[in-house]
Image (cartoon, rainbow, N blue to C red):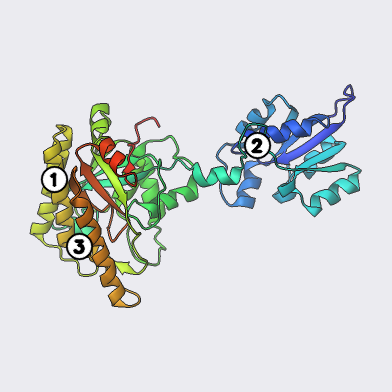
């Protein structure tokens, strides 16, 4: 690693450099002003042990990217572990100067340099002129590309205590995370959070059904203490791109899965669906308390799902709106807590107020011009009101709080 022919001082920096951004490049540029720049990069193993999550990019890919930056003389994967993983690399490179940014400076680092006669330089974190400040921490907060899902019709059928009465389809679409996905709002956030424990930033490129099975099994750990089985429609709705329907018959996993990635149909759906934010479902509210599941009610749910799929395939807006509304009505008939949640904790009067707020919100938005049908995603109890409208863009222009949806296409 020693370059005997170089007369410039050797400069060393170290870091993970996973989500490589302009702030890293500017740091390298500033450090390289002190001499020939050598970079130590945290290994995948070190990152996992220190941060308790995987990197977005594997160590060899990060090494390639860093070495390709023109300010960098050479780069290496650090052989050590923890926050001081760079020490073995430091002892091989034998730099004259060790550069850190101000929030990466530690007494331990300074001590190691002092013991080796290495000059220790602390730089302020400044963006390059004309650019905004970047940090990996901030990027990780906003750049997770894990999709979510919106259930369109038939859902609850993925619970075997419902499909035991009659089999039927659940219909879902996978959504790009183009908006803030709030907790307890009916968009499969518990399943999405389970996915992020394995793949923090994006789904792996693999067969969607195998991926959905892995997610379903991971979320429904046999040691799970609450005894609740998360329905498979959550994992399937997230992992399968485009439009999907899945058929349940008294089992937790569907007997068959059908998908649609026709661009005309997906664009048509996007032009007629919006979401209105509501208050999240309150902790302690039960939407299953008081459930009333009968053969006739389940058949109404499955018929609505059949009608909904047929309407979507023919891009029949009036039929789609009717089936969408019929499905929600069938859900609420079985689970009145979706609109009138029962407060399991605290003052029951609070629960009644919450239920009233939900119905008031539905009444308000269902009366708006252009709204043809409505439902709450997932188990309801709050979150969002997902509406079928005659023109999504026109509706959003009049109601800026409404959310435009982007369906995830295959290959993305």
Q: Quadrant of the N terminus?
A: top right
Which of pointers 2 and 1 indicates the residue nearer the eye?
Answer: 2
For label 2, the residue is 23
For label 1, the residue is 323
- Report the Cα–Cα distance between label 2 and label 1: 51 Å
Q: Quadrant of the C terminus?
A: top left
Of labels 3 and 2, earlier in sequence is 2
Q: Position of residue 243 (x, y in %)?
A: 27, 37
**In the drawing, does residue 67 fall left or right of residue 279?**
right
**In the drawing, does residue 30 fall left or right of residue 310?**
right
Q: Could you tell me if residue 343 is visible in this image?
A: no
Which residue appears at 32% of the width and 59% of the height?
A: 229
Q: Position of residue 287 (x, y in %)?
A: 26, 64
Q: Please identify the residue farthest to the top as the structure is shown.
A: 5
> Which mark identifies residue 408?
none
Which residue appears at 63% of the width and 36% of the height?
A: 59
> Mark 3–mark 2 contact, CB under 8 Å?
no
Q: Could you tell me if residue 257 is visible in this image?
A: yes
Q: Please identify the residue farthest to the left as the structure is shown.
A: 296
Of labels 3 and 1, earlier in sequence is 1
Q: Position of residue 4 (x, y in %)?
A: 89, 24
Mark 3 neighbour class, 10 Å CA radius: few under 14, some 14 to 19, many 20 or more: many
For label 3, the residue is 335
Mark 2 neighbour class, 10 Å CA radius: few under 14, some 14 to 19, many 20 or more: some
Of labels 2 and 1, earlier in sequence is 2
> Mark 2–mark 1 contact, CB under 8 Å?
no
């Amino acid at each position: 690693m020693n370059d005997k022919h170089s007369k410039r001082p050797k400069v060393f920096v170290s870091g993970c450099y996973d989500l490589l951004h302009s702030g890293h490049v500017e740091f390298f540029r500033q450090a390289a002003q002190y001499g020939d720049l050598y970079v130590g990069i945290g290994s995948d193993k070190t990152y996992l042990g220190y941060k308790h999550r995987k990197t977005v990019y594997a160590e060899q890919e990060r090494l390639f990217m860093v070495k390709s930056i023109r300010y960098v003389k050479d780069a290496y994967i650090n052989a050590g572990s923890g926050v001081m993983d760079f020490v073995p690399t430091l002892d091989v490179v034998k730099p004259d100067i060790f550069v850190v940014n101000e929030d990466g400076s530690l007494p331990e680092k300074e001590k190691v340099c002092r013991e080796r006669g290495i000059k220790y330089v602390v730089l302020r974190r400044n963006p390059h002129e004309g650019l905004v400040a970047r940090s990996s921490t901030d990027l990780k907060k906003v750049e997770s590309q894990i999709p979510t899902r919106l259930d369109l019709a038939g859902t609850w059928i993925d619970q075997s205590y419902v499909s035991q009465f009659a089999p039927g389809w659940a219909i879902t679409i996978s959504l790009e995370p183009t908006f803030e996905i709030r907790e307890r709002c009916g968009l499969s956030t518990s399943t999405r959070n389970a996915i992020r424990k394995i793949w923090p930033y994006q789904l792996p490129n693999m067969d969607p059904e195998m991926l959905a099975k892995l997610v379903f099994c991971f979320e429904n750990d046999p040691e799970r203490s609450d005894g609740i089985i998360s329905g498979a429609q959550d994992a399937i709705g997230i992992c399968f791109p485009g439009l999907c329907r899945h058929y349940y018959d008294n089992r937790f996993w569907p007997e068959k899965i059908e998908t649609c990635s026709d661009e005309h149909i997906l664009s048509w759906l996007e032009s007629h669906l919006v979401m209105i934010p509501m208050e999240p479902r309150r902790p302690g509210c039960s939407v299953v308390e008081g459930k009333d599941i009968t053969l006739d009610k389940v058949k109404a749910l499955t018929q609505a799902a059949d009608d909904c799929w047929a309407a979507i395939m023919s891009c029949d807006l009036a039929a789609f709106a009717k089936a969408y509304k019929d499905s929600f009505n069938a859900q609420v008939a079985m689970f009145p807590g979706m609109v009138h949640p029962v407060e399991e904790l605290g003052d029951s009067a609070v629960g009644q107020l919450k239920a009233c707020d939900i119905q008031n919100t539905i009444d308000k938005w269902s009366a708006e011009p252009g709204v043809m049908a409505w439902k709450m995603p997932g188990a309801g109890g709050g979150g969002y009101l997902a509406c079928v409208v005659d023109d999504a863009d026109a509706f959003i222009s009049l109601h800026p709080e409404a959310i435009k949806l982007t369906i995830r296409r295959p290959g993305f």
